[in-house]
Image (cartoon, rainbow, N blue to C red):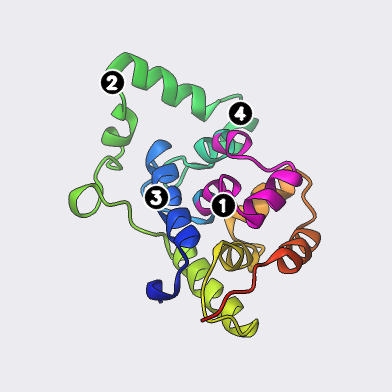
Amino acid sequence: MFERFTVEARETVKGAVAAAAEVRAPQVDTGHLLVALAGSVGPTGEALRAAGVTGERLRPELAAAGGPAGFDPAALATLGIDYAEVRRKVDSEFGDGALDRALGRGRRGRRGHVPFAPEGKRALERSLREAMALRDRHIGAEHLLLGVLADPAFLAPRLLARFDVDTPALRRTVLAARPRRAG
């Protein structure tokens, strides 16, 4: 499948891995893909930025959503606990990544590799299906965004909803602006 990725799509995947590493997430999910897509230079990134979606706005949301398994930062907030602030204080007192190490999240896959979460894998698979449905022989950033938007249960559409983004309208914009490429 990856041999069909355009240069922009490959860079987006690398950017998603970097975004996951930046917030110390144990896996890459659709939120990390969305951050990378928002930073892309082509029509897909332009469409996201026109909708008010930028990496700068998304990163704090990802950091809050990146709590350890079993922790819901939103639920903790209802109790007056700011998970991001707890993480900052623990890191400042005991060193970067101390909370992750204590929770057993500091370990990565082979040689620092951040693996894709099942949700991230499904979004990538969906990007292939989107490309095939459009009869495109490549998988570009536009297909990655369509894959990320495919399931409302994915993190990315939930993040977009927090920014009041009309995802059906975003989908139409991306489809209208998508470049036509030969095989």
Q: Quadrant of the N terminus?
A: bottom left
Q: Is residue 151 above or below residue 80?
A: below
Dot 4: few (<14), some (14–19), or many (≥20) neighbours within 10 Å? few
**Label 3 to label 1, Cα distance in Å?**
12 Å
Residue 17, label in figure = 3
Q: Earlier in the sequence, mark 2 or mark 4?
A: 4
Residue 132, label in figure = none
Q: Is residue 170 above or below residue 16?
A: below
**Label 3 to label 2, Cα distance in Å?**
22 Å
Residue 37, label in figure = 1
> Contact, CB < 8 Å: mark 2 with mark 1?
no
Q: Secondary structure at mark 4?
A: loop
Q: Earlier in the sequence, mark 3 or mark 1?
A: 3
Q: Main secondary structure of the magenta part?
A: helix
Q: Earlier in the sequence, mark 1 or mark 4?
A: 1
- Is 49 included in the stretch rendered in magenta? yes
Dot 1: few (<14), some (14–19), or many (≥20) neighbours within 10 Å? many
Which residue is identified by label 4? Answer: 79
Q: Earlier in the sequence, mark 3 or mark 2?
A: 3
- Residue lying furthest left in this view? 111
> Residue 7's spot in the image, x, y percent?
45, 61
> Residue 134's spot in the image, x, y percent?
65, 81
Which residue shows up at 65% across the image and 63% down it?
A: 149
Q: Which portion, as a residue range, is magenta?
A: 33-59
**Label 2 to label 4, Cα distance in Å?**
26 Å
Q: Earlier in the sequence, mark 2 or mark 1?
A: 1
Look at discs 3 and 2 and give the one toward the viewer: 3
Count all numbered tags in the image, as a single digit. 4
